[in-house]
Amino acid sequence: MPLIQNYNNKTIVNAPLLELRHLCVEFPTRKGSLTALDDVSFSIYRGETLGVVGESGAGKSLTGAAIIGLLEPPGRVTGGEIWLEGKRIDALPPEAMRSLRGKEIAAIFQDPLTSLNPLFTVGRQLTDTIQTHLAMTYSQARHRAIELLARTGIPAPELRIDHYPHQFSGGMRQRVVIALALAAEPKLIVADEPTTALDVSIQAQIIRLLKQLSRDLGTSIMLITHDMGVIAETADRVAVMYAGRVAEIGPVDSMIHRPKHPYTKGLMASIPSVRAHRERLAQIEGAMPRLDAIPKGCAFNPRCSAAIVRCQTERPELREAGDSHAACWVLAS
């Protein structure tokens, strides 16, 4: 559905850039298929940053991998659809997907060394990427590469462009990876834990950089993280995932201050606060279920103190809950 926003008494209809419609991902095993993503649906709008959060194993990174067509075998999309600018991309041939990746959708991963070839200078990697997707001469591509390094905060880019990845610090390498992601002017960036491997001060710099790029270039960002502090600083909306499903989705302010789903409430209660004195942080009892042991009904029901009988037998769908949408029977009762 289009997102209708009001600015200075003007109504602006913003069509989704990316749409996930009932996406399912399975991993076949000798004992049968395991469902890792189960009926995941959400949209990302132009210029928007959507934060995707949840515990390890919730399906965050898997969702990102499905979008960019980099699911690790034997994982495969078994249901649903992925649409980018009104074009279905989950069924594209491998060659067409490779052409799309980098030009329309780019990725930033947790460890920059997995994205950079240690045998080539960063300039070589940037110019190769630019010339693969854009009609530019080598000289034009190199000039653009220098501009990208400067935009992402690399000092003396005219000199650093000829350096190798090992000659950069961790934070600078992540800036190079962001420059690489921007090389072909993609409409969407999937950023998977882009600050986890960095110290706190460098994390703040990368967060500011992503916010600035989204604002200045109109790039949409899917920010995958377990850090609610990063989400609060960066995201416009938040999707909370649990056991391969979306538990709640809504504006970042509502999700942080007025969460509706019991799981989202638990996540928010576990965040340290400098304003409130607490002897111990709240915690969610239990652990994320294994793929072969996801309970019937609401997957969160064994850990939920508010669960009712219906939670154990029927799966809840996302429904309106204030400013957000939450999959919870307790809210409907």
Image (tube, rainbow, N blue to C red):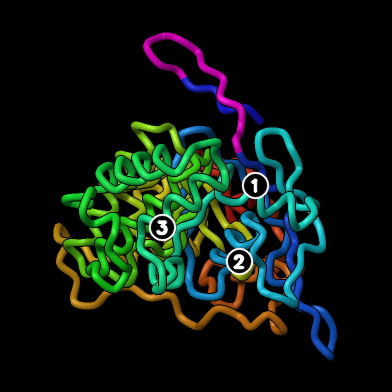
- Compared to 187, does 10 lie above or below? above
Which numbered disc covers residue 100? 1
Q: Amino acid at mark 2?
A: Leu
- Compared to 254, does 283 lie above or below? below
Q: Kindly report which numbered mark, 2 or 3, lies closer to the viewer in this rendering.
A: 3
Give the image quarter of residue 202.
bottom left
Q: Is residue 16 magenta?
A: yes
Residue 75 versus residue 2: which sits nearer the camera?
A: 75
Give the mark nearer the N terminus: 2 vs 1: 2
Image x and y of residue 129, in percent = 50, 51
User: Would you name the residue on which mark 2 appears?
Assistant: 62
Q: Is residue 272 magenta?
A: no
Image: magenta residue range? 6-17
Give the image quarter of residue 4.
top right
The answer to whether residue 266 is seen in the rendering is no
What residue appears at the point 24 percent right and 70 percent down from the top-left corner? 167
User: Would you name the residue on which mark 3 appears?
Assistant: 124
On-image quarter of the N terminus = top right
60 left or right, relative to 224: right
Image x and y of residue 168, in percent = 24, 67
Density class for disc 2 (Cα within 10 Å; few <14, some 14-19, many ≥20) is some
Q: Amino acid at mark 3?
A: Arg
Density class for disc 1 (Cα within 10 Å; few <14, some 14-19, many ≥20) is some
- Number of marks in the rendered image: 3
**Seen from this angle, which residue lies furthest top?**
9
The answer to whether residue 4 is seen in the rendering is yes
Image x and y of residue 319, in percent = 64, 45
Give the mark nearer the N terminus: 1 vs 3: 1
What residue appears at the point 36 percent right and 46 percent down from the top-left corner? 145
Q: Kindly report which numbered mark, 2 or 1, lies closer to the viewer in this rendering.
A: 1
Image x and y of residue 8, in percent = 37, 11
Q: Kindly report which numbered mark, 1 or 3, lies closer to the viewer in this rendering.
A: 3
